[in-house]
Amino acid sequence: MNAQFPTARPRRLRRNPAMRRFVRETTLEPRQLVLPLFYKEGLRAPAPVASMPGVLQCDLPTLRELARQAVAAHVGGVMLFAVPEVRDAHGSAALDPDGALSVAVREVRDAVGDEVLVMADVCLDEFTDHGHCGVLTATGEVDNDATLVRYAEMSVVLAEAGIDVAAPSGMMDGQVGVIREALDAAGHSEVAILAYAAKYSSAFYGPFRDAVDSDLCGDRRTYQQDPCGARREALREARLDIDEGADFVMVKPALPYLDVLSAVSSQSEVPVLAYQVSGEYSMVEAAAQAGWLDRRAAVLETLTAIRRAGADGILTYWALDAARWLES
Ligand code: PBG
C-alpha cells in the first residue's frame, strides 16, 4: 500500500450531516429521562438550591408546575424526594401517610395523571436527624434488618399515595425482597421496584445534601460501595436485586462509573438506569457559568455517553432542558 494513499478511509462515514445521521447508533429521547424533584414541607415559595443552579426545593404549587412541565416535555418520569419539617432518630415521618413524601406523591399524581411515571425514593436519610439511610443500633451502626422493616412499611405508604415505582436507594442488604413482599401483601403488586443496585460512596453527592438539607454525621461507607471495589461486586448486587424481584436496576453515579454501567448492562435481564447525580450536574453548570463549556453541547454529550455505556434510562436534573433541546 502506498503510505500516502490509505485504502481505509473511516472519514467517509463522517463526511456530512446526512451520512453522520445515518450511521449513528446511540439515541437519546425525552422518554428515557427522569426528572428528580424536591418537595420541602412548610415552604411558602420555592427556594433555590445554592450548589445546584436551576434546581429548586419546591413548595406544592411549584412541584405541581414542574411535574406538568415534565408531561409537556415528554420525559419518562419524575423521581420524588421530600424534606420534612421534623426529623428524628428513626425517620418516623417517612412512615406517616400524611408525611412530606406522601403529600408530594399525591400532589404530583393529581397533576400528571398517568402521563408520566411517578417514582419515589424509598430511604430514610431525608427523615433521620443523623442523616443515615437507616436506623442505628445502640452503638451507632446502621442496623440493616431493623431498617428493612421500615423500608417495607414506607413503600406501602407510598404505594397507597399513588406511586408507579418505588426506588430503594439505601443499599441495605435484602431491601428489594422485603419491599416486593410488603407491596404484594398489601395488594400493590402493580407497583414496580427500581433498585439502586450499584451505588457508590461518592463525593459527587455533595450538592444533593444541600438540596435535602442533610447534615450527615460520618459517611456511608459501610453500606454504599467503595469506588475502588471490584466490578464483580456491582454485578453481584445487580443479580441479587433482580433475584429479589427488581424491575429495574440502577448504577449511580453515572459518568464516573460508565465501566460499571456497561458491565451491569451487558448482564442484566431487566432495564438498566443510571443516575447522573448532583455533583455531575453542578460541575457542568459551574463551568458553563464561567464560560468554560458550551452548556447545551456538554449536557447532551454526557447524556449520550451514559446511553452509549448501556443505560436504558437516565435520572438527570437536566431532564426538562434536555428533552426540550431534543424536540426542538
Ligand atoms: C439517598 C440518596 C442520595 C442521593 C439520592 N438518594 C444521597 C446519598 O446517598 O448520600 C444523591 C443524588 C444526587 O447526588 O443527585 N437517599
Image: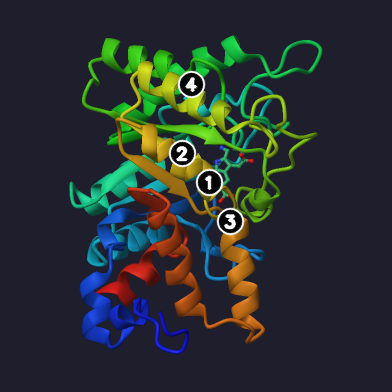
Residue topped by disc 4: 151
Labelled pair 2, 1 in contact (Cβ < 8 Å): yes
Residue at disc 1, secondary structure: helix
Q: Residue at x 39, y 82 (%)?
A: 6
**Amino acid type, callout 1:** Asp
Location of mark 1 (residue): 259
Report which quarter residue 246 is drawn in.
Answer: top left
Q: Residue at x 67, y 84 (%)?
A: 290
Determine if the C-beta at disc 3 is less than 8 A from ligand 1.
Answer: yes
Q: Position of residue 235 (x, y in %)?
A: 49, 28
Dot placed on the residue nearer the N-terminal end, 2 or 3: 2
Q: CA distance from mark 2 to mark 1?
A: 6 Å
Q: Amino acid at mark 2?
A: Ala
Mark 3 to mark 4: distance in Å?
A: 24 Å
Q: Element under label 2?
A: helix
- Specify which label sits upstream in the sequence, 1 or 3: 1
Marks 2/3: CA distance?
A: 23 Å
Question: Relative to residue 283, is residue 328 depicted above or below?
Answer: below
